[in-house]
Image (tube, rainbow, N blue to C red):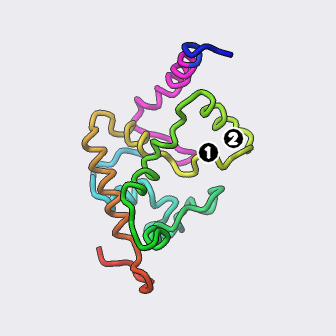
Amino acid sequence: MPSRSARLAALMLALLAVAPAAWSQQVPVKKLTFRAVASVNGKDLFKAYCAYCHGDDGKSHGPEAAVLRVPPADLTSIAARNGGKFEASAVEDKINGWKLVPRTITEMSARTEAMNTGKEAENVPVMPLFGPLFARLYPQEVRDRQIRMANLVRYVKSLQETPGSGEVPKR
């Protein structure tokens, strides 16, 4: 069994292998390339990062939705699926994905194998992890990333349909 220091060294080597992407201003995710946008407006961020899959209206009919192995969520019904309550922190956790970043070599290996073979594919995140992507796109601006994430979550909240109306509230 490898020692703890050997596992830590292997993890560091794996992280260093992906480090060059952190220096780039373009972050490829499958065939999409996300670019930094100047605006911190939630609607602009949604169009730049979310509409590809979730569609401009948030109803999961974006141009990339058809090619995904798991259909994107309808973002207009988050509150309805949660008993009428919009949990901003849970939505932020889902968007930023930090809780899904592999923490161990075993986790990273299992995820890599799932991506390569399709075995246990449910363990591979379906949505891009925007926390790490934002960290790469806006590396020197921690507070700016927090503002962007808060504005994006606020915009997703504005997309919520009121129960029974079938209409999107005015923004």
**Residue found at x 30% / y 78%:** 170
Picture quadrant of residue 48: bottom left
Asked if disc 2 and disc 1 are in contact, CB closer than 8 Å, the reply is yes
User: In this picture, is 107 found above or below 76?
Assistant: above
Q: Does 152 sit left or right of 133 as displayed?
A: left
- Image x and y of residue 12, in percent: 51, 20
Q: Does 102 sit left or right of 98 as displayed?
A: right
User: In this picture, is 167 found above or below 130?
Assistant: below
Indicate which disc residue 114 carries. 2
- Quadrant assignment for the N terminus: top right
For disc 1, the marked residue is: 124
Give the extent of the magenta segment.
8-34
Pick whichever of labels 2 and 1 is earlier in the sequence: 2
Under circle 1, the secondary element is loop
Label 1 neighbourhood size at 10 Å, few (<14), some (14-19), many (20+)? some
- Quadrant assignment for the C terminus: bottom left
Residue type highlighted by circle 1: Val
* Magenta stretch holds residue 12: yes
In front of the other: 125 or 141 = 125
Is residue 24 visible to the viewer in this orientation of the structure?
yes
Under circle 2, the secondary element is helix
- Image x and y of residue 49, in percent: 43, 53
Picture quadrant of residue 107: top right
**Residue found at x 43% / y 50%:** 93
